[in-house]
Image: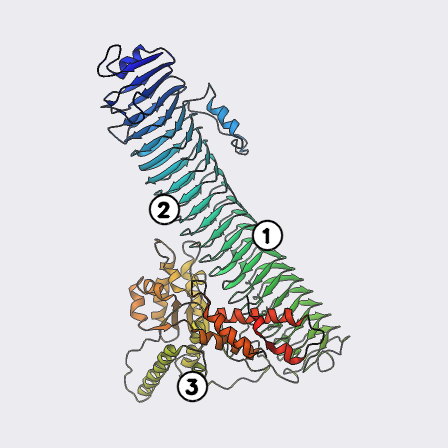
Amino acid sequence: MKILVAPKGRGAHRTIARALAAAEAGAVISIAPGEYPEALRLERRVTLEPAAGAGSVVIRPVESPALTVAAADCLVRGLVLRGQDPAQPLVRVEDGSGLTLEDCGLSHGRVEVLGSAGVPADPDGGPLPLTVDDDLRAQLDDPVAGGVLVLRHTRLHGAHHTALHLDGDARARAEDSIIDSVEGIGVVLSGAAVLLAERLRVSEVSGSALRARGNSRLLVRDARLSGAGRHGVLVQDTARAKVEDCRIDGVAMSGVQLDHEARAELTDCRVTRAGGSALAAGGTTRLIANGCRIVEPAANGLLALGDATAEAVNCQLSRTGFSALHFADRSTGTVLGTIVADSREHAVAVTDSASAELTGCTLTGAVMCGAQVTDAARLTMRGSRVVGGETGVRVRSSGESELRECAIGGQSKGGVEIGTDATVALLATSVTGVGSAGVTVDSGARLRMEGGGVYGAGGSGLVVWQGTEPQVRGVRIERAGKNGILVGEKARGLFEHCDVSVTTFPALHIGADAEPVFRGCRVFDCEQDVGTANGAKPTFEECVSVRVGSATLTGGPIGTGPKGGGGPAGPGTGPGSPPAVPQDINGGTGPASADDPEAGLADAGEAEPEPETLEELLAELDELVGLDGVKGDVGGMVKLMQMVRMREEAGLPAPPLSRHLVFAGNPGTGKTTVARLYGRLLKALGLLGKGHLVEVDRSALVGEYVGHTGPKTTEAFQRARGGVLFIDEAYALVPAGVANDFGGEAIATLVKLMEDHRDEVVVIAAGYPQDMDRFIGSNPGLSSRFTRTLLFADYTSQELVSIVEHHAQLHSYELSDGARDRLAAYVEAIPRDDRFGNGRTARQLFQAMTERQAMRVSELTSPEAQQLMTLREEDLPL
């Protein structure tokens, strides 16, 4: 039966309402073009459609709603519905009724689908009942369910509060539809409502794009959610959500947020440019992300709080503003086969009482740590890689952590740092090519290390601090820049069947009153095998030295050869002494500083060095490659400070002088090296008592909760008294576009401490040139104290070549003429992008050349010494 609606013509109804009154169930009402100021109510199964095609009929009632559906299986096709009040319902589907909107345009009002209230929640909290389409389709067709809505190729536009609201046990399906320009939330599910959305587009909403609360169920496939003023998907209470193959972009807060007891599964989703964390779970929620990609959120990539459980499988997270994976409070995290790249803080942070387990993951390029564990948190890593960043893994937690079959390498500072009271097991784990110590064990920490090794550390391979008793077995340490194993004052521990080779300082250093036991250990190819401080009492059982210039393990005051049970050591280091520490062009010079885990220990047993003279230090500064402008600035400041001292000694008032500095430059341009020299220069001038350098970053100053930041900043400042506090990437204390950050409290505390101890500590704030103005402008007290900025320019290609040659000379290599020529061309071709590391790049290039040379020479039967020393052009990376 077909009924016509037209302003004139025989047999046509003049209004839609009259046509509805005359229609029987199943009738099709065809409407002539025009605008109809009617409020319609469908009480029988009917179809409304335009006679002249989609968009030709506009229904604009004087009062809301424009359309009320009180019957099942109604169809509205191709109509335009416009409300008068965008905060009022435009379409209402009553409980037990059903409506399909196809090719329609709705504006200035919401669509609401009603259902019965009081539907009980899932009592057992079982898995999502949305794993198969048919399950949900059956619910949509359930005759005893609430209202049912189907949207196909339909646009909801210009509503207030929400565009689509499902309540009670309402059901809805949205296919190829658009929701936009909403002053509020795109879709709200409450009660026990269910929504299946496929190819839905939601944009320009001031609230969340999708919100599921109560005991509702949400299944979204191939959706595009962009520009939401709050979250992309918000799941609360006991609601469940399954989000597949969706794109969430540019939302102001979290891409996906879970609260209370909600559950959500994400598969093959991409979350980009979230204003908060990309994925966030709190309360007792459970979040599973499989095959998802997260790019450039302003905060964390995945954040778990409260008692939440979060799982990431085969995901990729890159360029996160905060730590990429952050597990806090009592949350639990499981991460499998996931890649984390270029986090601006840590790749993984585990805090409070949280626990995290990572398997088969790669963590690369974090600005701070690959993984940091604090408070009482626990971390387990298996078969994972940590590449680059400042520190590989830092554990400062009273909980137990384990690294098994992991590879850590390329950090500018340490490989694994184990803090006071931490308990860590390193099993078959390797540390390679780090800038400082390979593994550091702080006082009171507990380490069990079996298998694996430390290779090419810039500092000592394994550093054991005062009062510790590590258990180390079957570990190899090669090419350490200082000692192989450094046992600090009063430390103990058992070292079994370990091999140490090619170290710059004595392979084994034993601190004052230390009593370690070495059993079945071997030392190869070192200038000196053992160095001891006064009162050291090591025990050596079946230890040997091979090809060692000054050996004690094969006959001397310590031990009695291969079978020797060592007795107390005499004073001094025995015959020979460690070579002088040459300048490191890429950061770190001379004696160990107070912030170095090996400070005062690597040279233990030697006579107290003579005080450094101003002339020696200025000569050391002048020997640095490049940095001509910085050298001139520092030289000028030294002359000014000399004049100040002379005026003071003459009884004249000193002119105002601020010793605090801003070091502005890209990574690897020598900022830390110059900062360390600056402290030593001030000591030589008598302006600082110690001149040591304490290097910190945001993580060392800013706490995780209210009241934590002030004490952390104060503790770091106190360690620097008498020397220099070097704040690396200081601008991270003022994150761009982030309000109410604890970094402001750290800055305020720092300003007060600088005033209270103005003559005891020099503060140097370092970072990218374009970001340091933001840091200085964040607090009025900073601009008055940091009045001088030193600009560290990027190294030229020729300067980078000189740095590579310096490293070669330092490690007894030499470049062939062909290698030198090709090296210059290779360096010139390196892109100067955000991955360019200046001096660090040069150091990594030298390391790559030595590794390729080693592979080449290993194929020779009996290589000569010259062949072992020469780096040829084929040793350059391809």
Vertical placement of residue 240 versus 551, above or below? above
Q: Are marks 2 and 3 in contact (CB under 8 Å)?
A: no
Task: Please name the residue that numbered disc 2 is placed on.
Answer: 252
Q: Is residue 76 left or right of residue 36?
A: right
Residue 614's disc number: 3
> Where is residue 19 drawn, in percent x and y?
29, 13
Q: Is residue 363 left or right of residue 727?
A: right
Question: Dot 2: few (<14), some (14–19), or many (≥20) neighbours within 10 Å?
Answer: many
| Helix, strand or loop for disc 2 | loop
Residue 380's disc number: none
Q: Say which residue appears at 39% left-offset and 42% top-offset.
A: 231
> Where is residue 35 drawn, in percent x and y?
23, 23
Vertical placement of residue 636 versus 8, above or below? below
Task: Please name the residue that numbered disc 1 is placed on.
Answer: 360
Question: Dot 1: few (<14), some (14–19), or many (≥20) neighbours within 10 Å?
Answer: some
Q: Are marks 3 and 1 in contact (CB under 8 Å)?
A: no
